[in-house]
Amino acid sequence: MKKNKMFLLLFMYAIALTSCATYISTPQANLKYSVKVNSYGEDSTLIRKDCYLFLSDTMINKEDLQFNEFHKQISSIMRSKGYNVVDSIQSANIIILFNYGISNPKTKVYTTSVPIWGQTGISSTNTSGTVSANPYSNSLNYKQSTVQTPNYGVTGYRSEQQSIESYTRYLNLVAYDFEYFKLHKKEKRIWQTEINSTGYSNDLRAAFPYMLIASRRFIGHSSSVEKEFYINADNLNVKKLKGE
């Protein structure tokens, strides 16, 4: 955050110097995404909401198609919140820094009990016999046979170790008062929203619109505490955001 803060300060100062002469102040339906939102600040006192979206992560290529898609989705959410997303920073009174990404996989190893299948006993016993005559010796022969029907079930358990990998997808939005900066050469943070989603998929593109829809209510508003939401994969608002 300190790195972003210094970067923002230098960036805003340069912009202010160059512009001060002309600028006047549902996947399957049973699948769910878990999204955590932590938001600070308040934008309810803002009269003007002309915002410029500025990517703070220099490692992300702005020419990348994924960036264009994410920028479009963020812009759509901001417009639904009453903001006017402008293409030129000189037209903005609010700068919204954003960055996104996905963590390295985190491996969790756990032990499970696997049942062992086998014979547990005898359910029934059936004994039968046959009698035959020996014509040469004038005697009778008796032959008996017994058939047992076994029971099957769990005879015990064995322990097995298994591992799963999870990923944390994240998106951070921080809004600054650009007009205040140009007047005082100091940054003034209006609000910030931290969004993350942890799951077994490393597909950030799939999770991104769910993260935005889950956090929309608290963008520009305090969440008081970190809140967790579960969004169905067939959520209609997500489909609309994706243009489906």
Image (tube, rainbow, N blue to C red):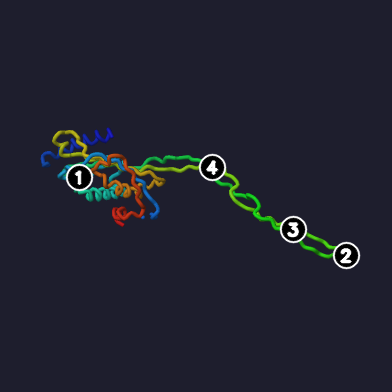
Q: Is residue 241 above or below residue 47?
A: below
- The image quadrant that residue 96 belongs to is top left
Calculate the distance from the C-alpha at mark 3 to the C-alpha at mark 1. 91 Å
In front: mark 3 or mark 1? 3
Q: Count the marks: how many?
A: 4
In front: mark 1 or mark 4? 4
Residue 112 in view (yes/no): yes
Q: Amino acid at mark 4?
A: Glu
**CB under 8 Å between callouts 1 and 4?**
no
State which tag comes first along the sequence, 3 or 1.
1
Is 98 left, or right, of 29 in this rendering? left
**CB under 8 Å between callouts 3 and 4?**
no
Is 83 left, or right, of 127 in this rendering? left
Assign a secondary structure to mark 4: strand
Q: Residue 18: image x %, image y %?
A: 15, 38
Residue at 23 percent across and 36 percent down: it is 8
Q: Amino acid at mark 2?
A: Asn
Calculate the distance from the C-alpha at mark 4 to the C-alpha at mark 2. 66 Å
State which tag comes first along the sequence, 1 or 4.
1
Assign a secondary structure to mark 3: strand
Is 233 left, or right, of 178 in this rendering? right
Residue at 22 percent across and 48 percent down: it is 81
> In terms of depth relative to the viewer, which is nearer, 78 or 227?
227
Specify the label residue 160 is tagged with. 4
Q: Residue 163: image x %, image y %?
A: 48, 42
Q: Residue 190: image x %, image y %?
A: 21, 39
Q: Residues within 10 Å of mark 1 (few under 14, many from 20)?
A: many
State which tag comes first along the sequence, 3 or 4.
3
Specify the label residue 138 is tagged with. 2
State which tag comes first along the sequence, 3 or 2.
2
| Residue indicated by mark 1 | 51
| Residue indicated by mark 3 | 145
